[in-house]
Image (cartoon, rainbow, N blue to C red):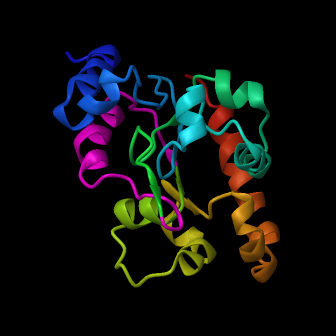
Amino acid sequence: MTTFEQIFQAIKADEQNKTFTAQGIDPLYFVHENARICLIGQAPGRIAQEKHQYWDDSSGDRLRAWMGIDRETFYHSDRIAIVPMDFYFPGKGKSGDLPPRKGFAQKWHPMLFEKMPQLDLIVLIGQYAQKYYLHLDTSQKSTAVVKNFQHYLPLYFPLVHPSPRNNIWLAKNPWFEPEVLPVLKEKVSERLKKQA
């Protein structure tokens, strides 16, 4: 049986990731057999990769507030997995980071999820995770997906990215905080209380 460590080493050894491995850069994600919740975002940013710590910024602070949990629970609970669409910083583009590499999630996510049989809430943060996991047409807007989040429950919970860059989006969509966040907090709390 393949272990988490064997998967980790396989990711590092993969030809697609050899440039990162040669520089001493490890894939950035967190998994545990007891995980109930999985957060799937885009990919680590440059600073996250350098610090080897995901969501350790203002976006992470907001995400934890949205989920109704503290840093200790977020980083040290065995109930929350972090599995982005790409485990490495993909580089800078003209307007923000480049998208996660195609085929990466398809190759590695199934192996990791197979070893987390208790997962029953997958939070899809941003358009890349949503389009991939919800099998959305490229024309479908994240705003509509998030607004209709109930449609994707009980397993999937689409969420806008908590980046300060989305402050304008939050101001334009005042329904988000009163309609979406109480349900997210409730679902997260339910999963964290379940026995391993």
The reply to whether residue 79 is visible in this rendering is: no
Which image quadrant for residue 136? bottom left
The N terminus: image quadrant: top left
Comparing 166 with 119, the one in front is 166
Q: Position of residue 121 (x, y in %)?
A: 53, 47
Q: Residue at x 63, y 76 (%)?
A: 147
Region rendered in magenta: 94-122
Is 42 covered by the magenta stretch? no
Residue 22: percent from left, percent from top: 30, 22
Locate residue 23, reporting x and y percent: 37, 23
Q: Is residue 130 left or right of residue 114?
A: right
Q: Is residue 172 left or right of residue 188?
A: right
Residue placed most toward the observer, 35 or 27 = 27
Membership of 109 in magenta stretch: yes
What residue is drawn where x is 41% and y is 38%?
88
As displayed, is residue 67 above or below residue 152?
above
Which residue is at 33% across, 14% downward?
Answer: 5
